[in-house]
Amino acid sequence: MRLKMPLNTIVFTVAAMLVIAGTAAVCAIVWRNGELASLRETGEHRLTFATSQLQNEISRQDYIHHIIALDPDVKDVLAASPARPGSYPIHRKLAMIGAEANTAAIYVLSRNGTVIAASDDSSPVSVIGTSHLARPYFLGALTDGSSAFFGIDPAAGRTSYFLAEAVRDGETILGVTVVKIDFTAIEGTWEAAEEKIVVTDENGVILLSGIPAWRYRTLAPLPSPTKAEIIYSDRYLGEKLDPLAVTKNDKIGRDRMISVDYAGGVSTYLMQSTQMFEHGLTVHRLVDTTSLIATERDGGIIGATLASLLLTLILYLRQRQRALSIARQSQAELRSAVAERTRELQVANATLQSEFDDHRRTERELRRIQSELLQASKMAALGQTSAALAHEINQPLGAIATYAASARLLDERGERAAVQTNLDAISGLVDRIARITRNLKRFARKSQDDPAVVFRLREAVERVLVLVGPQARGAGITVDTQFGADALICAPPVPVEQVILNLLQNAMDALADTPAPRIDVDITEIDGQAILSVVDNGPGLDGEALERLFEPFFTTKPAGIGLGLGLSISHGIVESLGGRLAADNYPGRGARLVLSLPLHDNSIGHREALAIA
Ligand code: ADP
C-alpha cells in the first residue's frame, strides 16, 4: 500500500533535513576550527619550547671555543714545534672545562687540522691524532677566524653543531679550537615524550628528529641534481636523503596539514614551523589530528541534535499556536453561537411574554365573560321565578293592607287587643316578605368572588325553595324534601344555591306536562361526601340528553326559553368546588340529578355554619 503524503509535509520534511544537514555541517566546521585553534595554541607553545631548547643548548656552549682560543696553555701547546698530540696536561684542562660546561667535545686542532688536544682524551676512543683538515668548520676558522657548521659527525654518526675559532699569536694563526654540540639528549626527550618534532635545514633534510626513522629523510623529494650535488657533502656524508611518504601537504593559514604514510598507516598531522634564521634551521612540530576528526564528528552530531531539537521546538510551538488559534476560534464561535442563541431566546422570551400577557388578558376576559355568564344565567333562573315571587310578595302585601285598614277601624272602636293581633299579623307578613327579598337580594348580587364559608347543604336547599317554592306551588308541583343529614360543607354559598336552583328549575320545566308532578329532594352523607339528589317524575333523559347534558348550548327547550347553559355552568361551579354533578334516569320515575360536594371537617365546629344560617 502506498502512503500519500501531503505536499507541504514533504516540503517541510525536505527543508527540515536540509536544515539539520546544514547545521550539522556548520557545527562540524565550527567545532573543527575550535579544536584546530586549541591544537594550534598548544602547538605554538610546545614549538616555542622546543626551539628554545635547541637555542639554549647552543647558546649555553657557543662561548667555550672563544675562551679556549685565548687560553695561554692552548697557545703554548700550539706554538710548540712540532706539536705532540696526547702528551700535554692540556687534555685534563679541556676535559674539566668540557665536563663543567657539559659539552659533547672540545678539540684543539693544529695548523694542519690534526687533533692535538681533546676533552675526551681519557676515553677509550681517543680522537687525538685524527684529522679535521677537510672539515668545513676548520677551513672556515682558518679563513674567517671563526665558523659554525651543522652536519653529521663522522665520529658519532649523528648530527652535531661545530663551532670553531682560530687561535692566534698576533697575526699568526697557531691552530683552531672546536666545540662540538650534541643534540642526542634533546632528541631523546622528544622521543620519550612522543613529540613529533623535526628540525630541517635549508634543503628540507631532517637533521634532528623525535622520530629516529625520519632522521636524514626529506619532507619533500629533492630535485635529482641537487640531491646528487649534496648527498656526499660534509653535512650528509652519503646518507640517502630519501623523502618521507607524504601523501598530502596543504597549507592552512601559517601552518600545513600533512599526511604521512609510515609505520603501516597514514597519519595526518597539523605541522607548525618556526625558523631559526641564525642557524639556517627550521623547527617543525607535528600534531596528531585524530582528535580533530572526532571533534568534527561530535560537532556534526551536536549540530544535528540541536537542529532537530530546534525543529521539534518550532514544530511544537507551531502546533501549540495552531491549537491555540483553533481553540480561540472555536471559543469565538461558541461565544457568537451563545450570543446568537441568547438573542433568539430573548426574542422567544419576549414573544412568549407577550403571548403570556395576551393569554392572561384573554383569561381575564374569559373570566369576566364567565362571571357575566354566571350572573346572567343566575338572573335568567331568577327571571323564571320572578312572576311567582311577585305573586308571593303581592299576596302578603294585600293582606297587610287589609289588616291595616281593619286595625284602623278596630282602633277607632277602641278594641286595642284586636288591633294588637292585627299588628302582630302584619309584622309576621312583613317578616315573610323580608325573608323573600333578603334571599332575592343575596341571590341576585354578584357572588363570584365570595369567600368560602361553612354551612349546611340543607339550609341552602331551604333558601332556594324560598325562591322557587311559589313557582312550584303555582305549577301544582309537590316538592318533597328528605334531609337525612345536615351535610356540612365549606364553599361560597350563592354558587351552590345557583346549582340547586338550576336543578329544581329544570325539574319543574320537565314536569310541565306531567300529571301529579312531583320533585323529591334528598340529602345524605356518603363516604365524606354530601349528596343532594333531585328526582322528578317527568319524561326523564333520552340517550342524546344523557350524553350531552353538560355541554354548553345543549337544550331541548324552544328557542328563547332555554339557552342550554344552566347545567354546563352548574357543572363548572361544582367542579371548581371539588365536587361532582351526575345525571341518570330514576327507575320508575323521571330524571335524577345528583350533586356531591366534599363534606367539611367537623372539627371546625358549627359556629361558622350557624353564622351563615
Ligand atoms: P336549559 O334549561 O336552558 O335547556 P340546561 O343546561 O339547564 O339548559 O339543560 C339542558 C337540557 O337538559 C334541557 O334542555 C333538558 O332537555 C335537559 N334536562 C335537564 N334537566 C332535565 C330533567 N329533570 N328532565 C328532563 N330533561 C332535563
Image: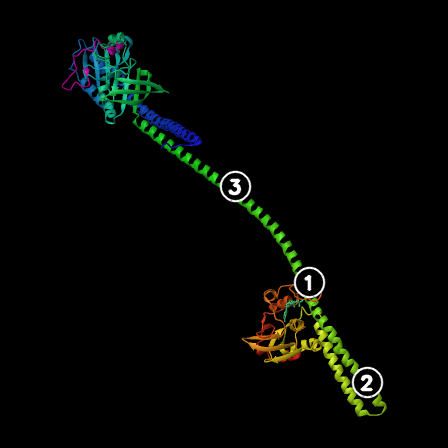
**Quarter of the displayed picture in which ligand 1 can be seen:** bottom right
Foreground tag (3 vs 1)? 1
Q: Are marks 1 and 2 in contact (CB under 8 Å)?
A: no
Q: Check disc 2 and give the amino acid type.
A: Ala
On the image, which quarter does residue 120 sit in?
Answer: top left
Query: Residue 87 placed where, x, y %?
Result: 15, 15
The crowd level at tag 1 (other Cα within 10 Å; few <14, some 14-19, many 20+) is few
For label 1, the SS is helix
Extreme-left residue of the structure: 124
Q: Check disc 3 and give the amino acid type.
A: Gln
Task: Please tell me which residue is depicted at 66% across the width and 61% down the height of the picture.
Answer: 366
- Residue situated in front as seen by the camera: 513 or 602: 513
Reply above or below: 326 against 511.
above
For label 3, the SS is helix
On the image, which quarter does residue 289 sit in?
Answer: top left
Q: Quadrant of the C terminus?
A: bottom right
- Residue situated in front as seen by the camera: 377 or 434: 377
Q: Are marks 3 and 1 in contact (CB under 8 Å)?
A: no
Q: CA distance from mark 3 to mark 1?
A: 58 Å
Task: Please tell me which residue is depicted at 33% across the width and 29% down the height of the picture.
Answer: 297
Residue 59 is at least partly visible in this image: no
Q: Earlier in the sequence, mark 1 or mark 2?
A: 1
Reply above or below: 380 against 298.
below
Residue that mark 2 sits on: 404
Residue that mark 1 sits on: 369
